[in-house]
Image (cartoon, rainbow, N blue to C red):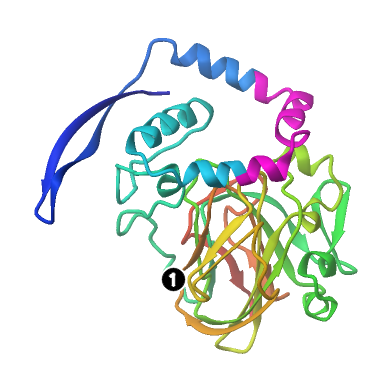
Amino acid sequence: MRRVVIVVSRVRHASDSDAAHHLSVVDHTPPFASALRSLRDRLLLQEDLNFLLTNRVPRIALTRLMGWYSRIDSPLLARLSIAVWRLFTELDLSDARRRRFRSLHECFTRELLPGARPLDPRPRALLSPCDAIVGACGRVRCGEVLQAKGFPYPVADLFGDSAEAAGFEGGRYLTLRLTSAMYHRFHAPCDAVLEHVRFLSGDTWNVNPIALARVERLFCRNERVVLRLRRDDGGVLVLVAVAAVMVASVRLHALDLRLHLGYRGPAELPCGRRVARGEELGWFEHGSTIIVFAPADCEPAAGVAPGERLRMGQALLEFTS
């Protein structure tokens, strides 16, 4: 928990006679931090209250409002917002390429320092596409997977395409949850061609474990983007980027497109863009979830299990044949 001291300095630009304000930050740990964090944790661990505050609200209106607010160009407002954000999350900007932000959106979608996420060197390892906490994982059985214990959902509903879903019967799936404080960009798990993108508009339920244990077929209800990648050996991977409350926006570099609640373009988006292993595919504009679907001849890499934290570039799955 940190107290943020804001120092304003004036810097002149050669192309502009007006002075621009820039902010530098000095962090201190306030004496009340532990008590405040303890209170926060007690409130968030009360499941009924957590669910009420994050779901029984006008979710779509709140998400639109957050999208507008996050783009306000004001370094001072950004600093104050980040200070409040830190009261509720474990936000760590130590590996961010930039430490000063003109908007909250810039902080959400921050880039990292070079080398901050080294890639697993083994060519047969599929990389984690993002920083995440591992959720439900296993094999696709009878066209279904789990979002939480006792809560199955059909892969065809998630994909929005029955034929594409049928190709993963017996295959592997892993649910990767990004918290709001995490690095929000996602990357290619392997060398591949991003063949196709499908946008499925929907709701904006929270995707935390409390909501997943209460709302059936939650991932199939929320707005999501389905990315189909064809590996060089002809095999297929699918990444399903699921948006959530205060998110509902995904930026894809291959299409130079932002998919969000107000998007009114085509839902089926052919692509054909070659991507390299570890190459950035795009970003969420807050935290959310990526569900990875892979062939049957894959096994989770060492240390990949529900509840474990991963960083982008770590081995997620390994081919067994």
Residue shown at 45% from the left, 78% from the top = 276
Residue shown at 84% from the left, 44% from the top = 215
| 72 and 24: which is toward the camera | 72
**Residue 193 among magenta residues:** no
Q: Position of residue 131 (x, y in %)?
A: 51, 52
Q: Which quarter of the rendered picture does the N terminus lie within? A: top left
Give left or right: position of 173 versus 34.
right
Disc 1: which residue? 279
Q: Residues within 10 Å of mark 1 (few under 14, many from 20)?
A: some
**Residue 61 among magenta residues:** yes
Helix, strand, or loop for circle 1? loop
Q: Which quarter of the rendered picture does the C terminus lie within? A: bottom right
Q: Amino acid at mark 1?
A: Glu
Residue shown at 39% from the left, 33% from the top = 77
Secondary structure mainly formed by the magenta segment: helix
| 106 and 206: which is toward the camera | 106
The magenta stretch spans which residues? 43-64
Q: Position of residue 69 (x, y in %)?
A: 51, 41
Residue shown at 46% from the left, 61% from the top = 313
| 50 and 265: which is toward the camera | 265
Residue 208 visible, this orientation: yes
Give left or right: position of 275 versus 233.
left
Residue 206 visible, this orientation: no
Q: Is residue 108 above or below residue 299?
A: above
Numbered label tally: 1
Q: Is residue 251 above or below residue 148?
A: below
Q: Position of residue 235 (x, y in %)?
A: 65, 84
